[in-house]
Amino acid sequence: MPAAQQPEWPDREALAEAVAELGLAPSLVLPEECDTLRDRLATVARGEAVVLQGGDCAETFDGAREEQIDAKFRTLNQMAAVVAEAAVMPVVTIGRMAGQYAKPRSHAHETRDGVTLPAYRGDLVNASAFTPESRTPQPGRLARAHRVSATTLNLLRALAAHSRTEFWTSHEALVLEYEHALTRGTPSGPYNLSAHTVWVGERTRRPGDAHIDYVARIRNPIAVKVGPTTTPDDALALVDRLDPEREPGRLTFVARMGADAVRDVLPDLVAKVTAAGSPVVWVCDPMHGNTFLADGGFKTRRLDVIVDELRGFFEVHRALGTHPGGVHTELTGDQVTECLGGTYPVTPADLPTRYETACDPRLNRGQSLDLARALADLYAE
Ligand code: PEP
Ligand code: MN
């Protein structure tokens, strides 16, 4: 089966050793926890709760610091409180955390000043510095990703227990060696025990792709990103493949259409999936369809455009009488300058000040709370 977006590991023997080591490593979550998250997502499917999912585009090993983890956790929980009050519904809070170390890339290589090297694919695979050594995929990074996930999750569990809140982890299931090695058989079937839930990205969601085959086999709640080229038939094929039993909470579609396309493309998808009797959860990722290059080469996004996509997502669901299930966003608890706008606005001139992301631009703490207030207003309408 074709597996897109996989690293070209130079040393297959070292890879096999790394995978064998990972296969013996303790799992990070329990199958029962994954089942509980599926129950929570089932309440979203029924229109009785809301999903708030967020975190870095790409976590880094160096970024697994107490203050940064704590700030992201607090930001997500403050956002959840704002939304829960306005929506008068519980919020299911899911971090893109403790495992979001692999990135799909539009180009397998990058060229600078006539030198071409493999693209940076996330700390799970290689390092971002533009040198041949850094960019060579290193199998030892698989075990390191597991260890850094474990230390991150350890702090998240302590924070959640102390503030008596539920907090779930997620990442994109991308590098199949890693995901397979942390998939464990249980009496109720195989689970990916590296996160409570995983998603398949826009670039790897074709029904014949190895990634779809993989998530079809695991029992975790799963999600698939659906972009503006998704047809109703594509969506129905995914539903039949990934949720043949029509089990509420099993499958989430994360619509990432772009503010320009959401009002045109989404209605048909939602209408046909609903007519097919699928209880899929619909979540809006208002980030990935709205990225552009600013002067100076900074990849960025505008908060007003992000909010406009969210508004379009709500308009579509309100018109169809379906539930706008929540938001999937890229954010950090730090005051970075990566996205434009906000109550304390980041201007194009500010972008170089604190542009720290390892991949896509994230909302800073203030912008994240702005987004939460916009979401709250939409639920309160
Ligand atoms: C992402 O979530 O960082 C990502 C790459 O998204 P998508 O698959 O929707 O492009
Ligand atoms: Mn991203």
Image (cartoon, rainbow, N blue to C red):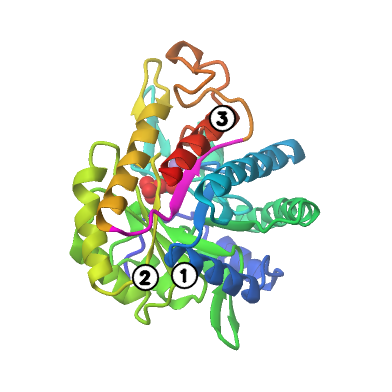
Quarter holding the N terminus? bottom left
**Horizontal side of residue 270 vs 100, given as left or right:** left
In depth, the one of 109 and 227 nearer the eye is 227
Question: Would residue 246 be seen by someone viewing this image from the given angle?
Answer: yes
> How many residues crowd around disc 1 within 10 Å: few (fewer than 14), some, or many (20 or more)?
many
Q: Which x, y percent locates residue 301?
A: 40, 29
Q: Amino acid at mark 2?
A: Pro
Q: Disc 1 designates what residue?
A: 249
Q: Tag 1 or tag 2, which sits nearer the N-term?
A: 1
Q: Is residue 52 above or below residue 16?
A: above
In depth, the one of 131 and 126 nearer the eye is 126
Determine whether the beta carbon of the residue marked 3 sits less than 8 angstroms from the nearest atom of ligand 2: no
Q: Disc 3 designates what residue?
A: 364
Give the CA distance from mark 2 to mark 1.
8 Å
Q: Which residues are magenta?
A: 321-332
Q: Which x, y percent locates residue 33?
A: 64, 71
Q: Residue at x 54, y 80 (%)?
A: 190
Q: Which x, y percent locates residue 67?
A: 74, 36
